[in-house]
């Protein structure tokens, strides 16, 4: 099983990164082949609404998204991890997700189905978020974004982990229950079949 972890934070080694590392470790223990993409290190332009993807179902803007597109198609499991900014995902992750408009066009405009994963396993996804606040409403926008991102991939939104009150870099290290929850999330996501 291929598990793709997508780190959406611009801050390396921050709280969402640490939780994603734990989730990927849990998935690896369950026997998955794990890979991590760090969105902030990629050159990914925002969607320019050119409708170029309405012809072939692929984005016509040439940058690092082209390589990530293939990884999204073959992953059986996807884990997005992001800090919450103004009650939503990070700008870097949002630009990445917006570029998946080509998958939306493929599905809803061109009426083309995605190829099955190499194993034939249905796609499933999980969301990990961190925030300096602990207001449940503060995580809802990220949940909604994740739900519709996964819809374009014909993937089930299987798990989520929201960890609040962790604003300082590395603060989640003082929350062993959150680190364990992330590990179990990854393990369960890889185990579910």
Image (spheres, rainbow, N blue to C red):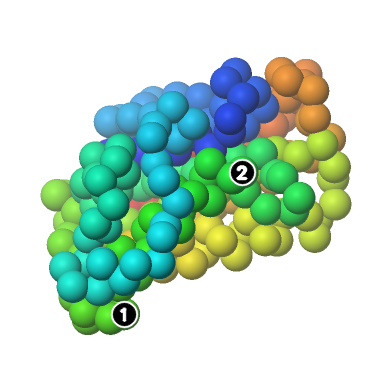
For image coordinates 76% across by 39% down, the residue present is 131
Q: Residues within 10 Å of mark 1 (few under 14, many from 20)?
A: some
Vertically, is 113 above or below 28?
below
Q: For the N terminus, give its image quadrant.
A: top left
Can you see residue 24? Answer: no
Can you see residue 85? Answer: yes
The residue pinned by badge 2 equals 90
Q: Residues within 10 Å of mark 2 (few under 14, many from 20)?
A: many
Image mark count: 2
**Mark before the other along the chain sequence, 1 or 2:** 2
Q: In this rendering, would 165 be left or right of 31? A: right
Q: Position of residue 71 (x, y in %)?
A: 26, 43
Give the quarter of the image for residue 115: bottom left
Q: CA distance from mark 1 to mark 2?
A: 26 Å
Give the quarter of the image for residue 114: bottom left
SS for callout 2: loop
Vertically, is 27 above or below 74?
above
For image coordinates 60% across by 18% down, the residue present is 13
SS for callout 1: helix
Q: Position of residue 36 (x, y in %)?
A: 39, 30
Vertically, is 97 above or below 154?
above
For image coordinates 21% across by 79% down, the residue present is 110
Q: In this rendering, would 38 be left or right of 122? A: right
The residue pinned by badge 1 equals 108
Q: In this rendering, would 140 be left or right of 184? A: right
């Amino acid at each position: 099983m291929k598990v793709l972890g997508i780190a959406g934070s611009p801050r390396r080694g921050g709280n969402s990164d640490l939780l994603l590392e734990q989730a990927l470790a849990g998935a690896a223990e369950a026997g998955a082949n794990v890979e991590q993409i760090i969105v902030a290190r990629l050159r990914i332009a925002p969607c320019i609404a050119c409708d170029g993807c309405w012809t072939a179902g692929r984005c016509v803007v040439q940058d690092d998204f082209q390589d990530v597109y293939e990884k999204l198609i073959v992953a059986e499991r996807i884990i997005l991890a992001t800090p919450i900014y103004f009650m939503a995902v990070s700008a870097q992750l949002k630009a990445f997700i917006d570029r998946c408009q080509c998958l939306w066009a493929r599905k809803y405009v061109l009426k083309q189905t995605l190829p099955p994963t190499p194993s034939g396993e249905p796609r499933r996804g999980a969301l990990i978020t961190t925030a300096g606040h602990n207001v449940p409403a503060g995580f809802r926008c990220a949940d909604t974004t994740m739900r519709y991102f996964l819809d374009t991939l014909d993937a089930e939104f299987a798990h989520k982990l929201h960890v609040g009150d962790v604003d300082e870099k590395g603060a989640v290290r003082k929350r062993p229950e959150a680190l364990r929850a992330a590990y179990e999330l990854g393990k369960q996501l890889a185990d579910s079949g």
